[in-house]
Amino acid sequence: MILDKIGIISCSGEECLGGTISRLAVRKMMEELKPGMVSTLCLPLFIAGDGGEREFAEKYPTIAVDGCSKCCAKRAIEKYSNKVAGSVDVAEIIGAEIALEKPLSTRNLTTEHMEYVKKTADKTCEIFDEILAKSV
Amino acid sequence: MSKIKVIPCSGIGKVFGLLARESALMVTQEKCPDDTETLCLAHVVTGDNEVVEKIKGETCITMDGCAKYCSKKSVEETGGIVVKSHKVPDFMKAHRGEEHGTGTYLTEDGWKYAEELAEIMVEEVKEIKAGVN
Ligand code: SF4
Ligand code: SF4
């Protein structure tokens, strides 16, 4: 099966920096790294949605991008939809202490934060390419 | 009284989700840090005991990005008491024709709108506090 899209869902956690990074990394995948090849969904829609949202991870191999080791996106996707095809934990990339710092408004982003976003997006991209290669 | 929970949805596809998030961060971090706090909605959604304990029976204000009301629904399902529920497009009337940005960034008009949404919630925080004290 040749895939035309891969799902990527971030936890977008509002309580800590890792959540902000997870969200921005997914946006970077959508806009810069894999434009047109990413399908995403607001995570809470798995629960609150009344349409076919819960089938999302059955339709697309899905990568979860989580802000900390609680891995809420991964767990929610697996509980309500399907096993994830891959997962990224921002805390493993930037360190748990930094990931658990206060959440960040996009207007306070520094070059250091953008580097965290890049590293997280690069890791996500690696998994994305592996999934794609396996599907050919 | 414990801190009022201000919980935005986690909308990622459009600017409305980012407006909800930024306005909630303004309230909890800048405008009323002593009276409010936020929680990860994705964590609420997992139903983990740890987060259920934090939210059950607590006073919450939700700001959603669209009529799916993910934050309101998920918070209520977890036992939070939603005393004020909003969705970003409800306040759009005065902002028709403006460009607010995308799910990644806000424009100057977007920041003004987020500020307006935050002020609405700040007034509500004051009302809730006044009613309780
Ligand atoms: S994984 Fe961590 S940052 Fe993300 S929603 Fe869960 S608790 Fe929040
Ligand atoms: S309320 Fe709308 S924008 Fe917000 S998470 Fe749900 S579907 Fe997404």
Image: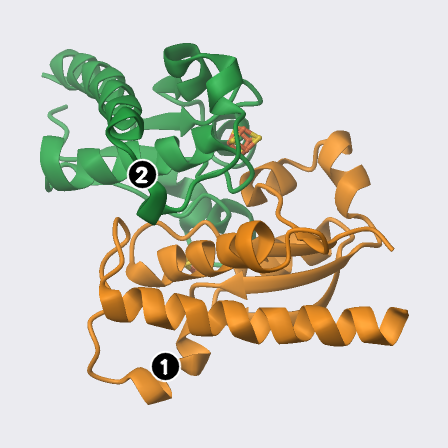
Chain colours: A green, B orange
Q: Residue at x 40, y 66 (%)?
A: B114
Mark nearer the viewer, 2 or 1: 2
Q: Secondary structure at mark 2?
A: loop
Q: Is residue B85 visible?
A: no
Residue B96: percent from left, percent from top: 26, 85
Mark 1 neighbour density, 10 Å: few (under 14) some (14–19) many (20 or more): few
Q: Residue at x 37, y 40 (%)?
A: A56
Q: Is residue B104 visible?
A: yes
Q: Tags 2 and 1 in contact by the CB under 8 Å rule?
A: no
Looking at the picture, tell me which residue is in the foreground, B83 or B127.
B127
Q: Quadrant of the N terminus of chain B?
A: bottom right
Residue B28: percent from left, percent from top: 59, 53
Q: Secondary structure at mark 1?
A: loop
> Does A98 sit left or right of A47 as displayed?
left
Q: According to the image, label 2 marks what residue?
A: A109
**The label number, if any, that marks residue B92 in the structure image:** 1
Looking at the picture, tell me which residue is in the foreground, A121 or B67.
A121
Q: Residue at x 53, y 36 (%)?
A: A80
